[in-house]
Amino acid sequence: MELEIMAIGAVIIALCAVPFIATVRIRKKEEKVLLDGLNTIAKSHHSDVGIHDFGVDFAIGLSSAKNHLFFYKEQKKGKTITECIPINLIQSCMIHKVKRRVKTKKGTEEVLQRLELVFNLHGSEPSTCSLPFYDSEQHYQPSGELPLIEMWELTIKEARRFYPT
């Protein structure tokens, strides 16, 4: 009797733990794919990835020499966004938030639609480049992208200090 109760308890615990273990394994596998994407971009520019972070469907990294910024994002329908931005070409870096107003019972609220890191690049022809961190059309709600984008804005500005403007 006591052995049966212990066996049933062990089975119940195992059944409760399996979804969490599966989720962690799936996320690690997704992160490996994203990191491989970053490493591919870095190798094509004769560099390597020093520091990096992961979002829900993207990875961002800085070369160990802090001279290139790498971005890899997997979108729906098998499309990917890959970017390699030389730090010395970045004139400015800022967070761009696109919000819309939604009517609620208590009035109106602002809802985040898009979150991007936007760069003004200088060179022979000045241009802009944006890295999409969050888009409400792809994901229902943000999942840690705001603190991540704020941290990377500071990291990039810190890396820019090594290059005179």
Image (tube, rainbow, N blue to C red):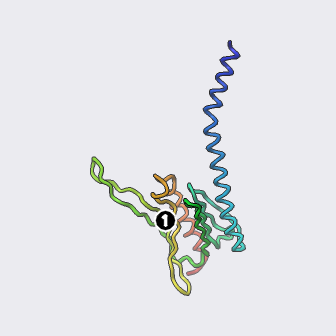
Question: In which quadrant of the rendered image does the C terminus lie?
Answer: bottom right
105 or 160, nearer to the observer:
105
User: Image check: 28 left or right of 107?
Assistant: right
Name the residue: 71% across, 67% down: 48
Kindly give the residue lying farthest to the front in the view shown.
Answer: 77
Q: Position of residue 99 (x, y in %)?
A: 38, 61
Question: Could you tell me how many numbered marks the image carries?
Answer: 1
Instruction: Examine the image and state in which quarter residue 60 appears.
Output: bottom right
User: The disc labelled 1 sits on which kind of residue?
Assistant: Glu
Name the residue: 57% across, 68% down: 156
Name the residue: 68% across, 69% down: 42
In the structure shown, which secondary structural element does the residue marked by tag 1 occupy?
Answer: strand
User: Image check: 97 left or right of 6?
Assistant: left
Q: Position of residue 149 (x, y in %)?
A: 52, 61
Instruction: Examine the image and state in which quarter residue 83 appears.
Output: bottom right
Name the residue: 51% across, 83% down: 126
Q: Position of residue 157 (x, y in %)?
A: 55, 70
User: Mark 1: few, some, or many residues within 10 Å (few <14, many ≥20)?
Assistant: many
Question: In which quadrant of the rendered image does the N terminus lie?
Answer: top right
User: Image check: 48 left or right of 94?
Assistant: right
Q: Position of residue 82 (x, y in %)?
A: 60, 68
Compared with 136, 81 (above or below) is below
Please give the residue where the numbered disc 1 appears in the rendered image.
116
Instruction: Examine the image and state in which quarter residue 32 appears.
Output: bottom right
Compared with 110, 71 (above or below) is below
Kindly give the residue lying farthest to the top in the view shown.
Answer: 1
